[in-house]
Image (spheres, grey):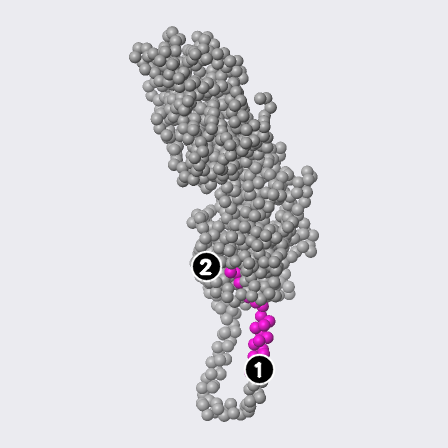
Amino acid sequence: MEASPVTNVRISSVVPASVTGQNKPRQLTTMDLAMKLHYVRAVYFFKGTCSFTIADLKSNMFPLLQSYYHVSGRIRMPDNDPSAPAIPYIRCNDSGIRIVEAKVEEFTVEKWLNLDDRSIDHRFLVYDHVIGPDLNFSPLVFLQITQFKCGGFSIGLSWAHILGDVFSASTFMKTLGQLMSGHGPPKLLYPKTPEPTPHARDRDGEAISIKKIESVGEYWLLSNKCKMGRYIFNLSHDQIDRLMAKDTAQDDQPFSEVDILYAVIWRSLVKIRGESETNVITVCDRKKSSTCWNDDLVISVVERKNEKIGISELSALIAGRKREENVAIKRMIEQDRESSDFFTYGANLTFVNLEMVNMWEFEIKGEKPDFVNYTIHGVGDKGVVLVYPKGKFARSVSVVMPEGELAKLKDEVINIIM
Amino acid sequence: MSDFSSSVKLKYAKLGYQYLINHFLTLLLIPIITSISIKLLRMGPEEFINLLNSLHFDLLHVLCSCFLIIFVLTVYFMSKPRTVYLVDYSCYKPPVTCRVPFATFMEHSRLILKDNPKSVEFQMRILERSGLGEETCLPPAIHYIPPNPTMESARSEAQMVIFTAMDDLFKKTGLKPKDIDILIVNCSLFSPTPSLSAMIINKYKLRSNIKSFNLSGMGCSAGLISVDVARDLLQVHPNSNAVIVSTEIITPNYYQGNERAMLLPNCLFRMGAAAILLSNRRSDRWRAKYKLCHLVRTHRGAEDKSYYCVYEQEDKDGNIGINLSKDLMAIAGEALKSNITTIGPLVLPASEQLLFLISLIGRKIFNPKWKPYIPDFKMAFEHFCIHAGGRAVIDELQKNLQLSAEHVEASRMTLHRFGNTSSSSLWYELSYIEAKGKMKRGDRVWQIAFGSGFKCNSAVWKCNRSVKSSEGPWSDCIDRYPVFIPEVVKL
């Protein structure tokens, strides 16, 4: 699909229901700054006619934003002390988030979901949102509500990663669903004032999970050398069980389903890109907490020295030899003092575990979404792999890779699972 | 120290003078009555009876005198104008979904006017000094980038604000729609066919012999013009009531161009409406909140300068907007002076009027350089409701009438919480005073409204019963007020 099937686009803003007051500043932590150039994008589909309208959705956003007032804020750069590092912060001035209302007249939701290419979800049903170039007046979140021919609709969320990780974004949507279903005001699941992290003392050595680049200025998006494409692999539970059985544990190092899925993609890319290009991978996990902020992310690296590239070897490597780099990342960013920018997803081949993400819990008056598609926008050239939580019949693995490699990757993965 | 004692002496002298002049008649009558009664007491009963007999009263004389007295009393009561009571009123409180914080308004302006950074700068400066708060509301159609004003969205805004205000009025007063005798709607800039009053009649199924009026084009002072029309009608129709709906519909009038002088109303005008129930029925005397004492209308339209100062016109791109001239404040001041000259004699106590007369004569005959005496209106009124047209208007009037910050608090806080809601702003201000618990029985209120033309209208109400603070547009936020409004708010 080349031309956009989306018509009748109308843009407006929704703001918090009550005054937050005094333009409260909200500091960004170092982990937030590591994620500055990334955006979480999600699309939720609802088939058929629903028991709520777009007006209901919009009017429930107001009390939602009352609790999530930092989401309604805007980026500001501190302008007083020239010697102190210019760390951007969020000014909670109730500016609000942008809502886009649109229509797709040629397709029903079912017909849309039956199309093969799932990248169309993010190309057309999510607004192409970037913070900047007008940094002080750019919304941090865009929500696109697209109505289809059948009366069903899709909700496309574009969420700046500085506000929180994929779990934070899905909790935001889940809370919206709860408000629409008539439950009371949401419990705040993010820390009111992010505490400064303790200074790193002993570790030496640079963090290799993040990459330093020249400052992007006032347009917060990573530029890629090649065009990135998206694809979703759906592996049935049988296929995964077969994989687990085939590649038995080595050296008594047990590994999980997620580890083996990582290993499948890693091995395929080693074959496509060559051994020297893919010696390091980044693995993103999450601490077992329900707080919504970037500091609960656990970023580790796995380095391959000269191990064999079998699935079981790689799985064991991933399960056993992860090296946490959070402290090193924080130190590296703090020492830089804001002269350059950093990015995480795509600095190396990055694997993100979304098992904790409650993506299907976005329920409106008992209606659950028919399909959910999460991805990351603003990914480095090495690509990102997102492993969704276990579904009823299959598990999805969503990849963001350079387009040239995608076809080869599909073939490799099919070879492995058959 | 001597300054202090001399100022205290001056204060006492002033108080003494005021007491003397204001109670002049009483002070004159007391010695006369005392002397007559002393004389009568000295006379003794037999002399008194002799005096009465000598007057030669007979039946015819007595009967004629009685009839004369009865006749005079009847003529007096028949020709007395009917008292118009304000039974109750309700103000529209916009829903949270219409809220427009400063930052959002600025951001939308930047996006809509992105080819005109000078206009954006201008709007930013106006907003910083406007005195508006973070909770003012605009109708849903204006929240889009760019705004989406259609006739349908204008009608739906009208329905939303008017019907909510009227439902609230019915609930507060127990009024039944079929009992409404007179309906007056004033909305300056939105005048569809059928009229807004027809829209109300249709919605509430009002009687077929209702006297309905729809005033449009009369600006922010139209609220008091409606009260004037209602008062005149209630003189002609006995035992009737009148419902007045004052509002301004923002949707069709949001200026979409980039001419600076015409962008100003966009920054100040906000959603609002008020519904008021007036009555001349004796049965409403006990439950009415206020009694209408005076209503004075002044029109300066005969002068070109006043006529053109608030002028609706097309800009060079064909966008229609309201052009506010730079001498608006000066013209407002002059209009106020005319209005005061008429209302002063009606409300000011004799002491102030005498001083004003002396100062006037002095300036005319002796020395024109004498400073004109500004009568102290604080002696005539306990509360002031100045139309919240903008910060400059309130500042100007505070200076001209020499009012304290407390007197103009209702106006400033209404501007902060609701913005300039045009003709309904006076009712929000009155509601503020009531919500603060300051309205007591016998208090007099002065409502002053300015409007295009250039008009200055004022109404004087007297509180009929002490008002307990009840449900109203201020009920959820009155505890936060008064707030300090800085000169410039940094965005």
Could you tell me residue B175's position as x and y percent? 51, 58
Residue A100 location, quadrant: top right
Residue drawn at (60%, 43%), measured in percent from left and top? Answer: B152
Determine the residue located farthest toward the left in the rendered image. A252
- In the depicted structure, whether residue B290 falls above or below residue B259: below
**Residue A323: which disc?**
none
Query: Is B55 contained in the magenta span?
Result: no
A216 or A358: nearer the viewer: A358
Q: Amino acid at mark 2?
A: Val
Q: Chain of mark 2?
A: B
Identify the residue at image location x=41%, y=24%.
Answer: A391
In this picture, is B388 found above or below A197?
A: below
Across and down, in percent, residue A142 comes to 51, 31
Q: Earlier in the sequence, mark 2 or mark 1?
A: 1
Instruction: Write down the chain letter for disc 1.
Output: B
Percent from the top left, x then y, of residue A372? Answer: 46, 26
Q: Name the residue rendered at 52%, 13% in the picture.
A: A404
Q: CA distance from mark 2 to mark 1?
A: 43 Å
Residue A21 seen: yes
Of the residues tagged 2 and 1, which is closer to the observer? 1
Residue position for label 1: B67
- Residues in magenta? B66-87
- Within 10 Å of the Cα at label 2, are there few (<14), some (14-19), or many (20+) other Cα atoms? some
Residue B467 is marked as 2
Amino acid under disc 1: Phe
The one nearer the camera, B141 or B336, is B141
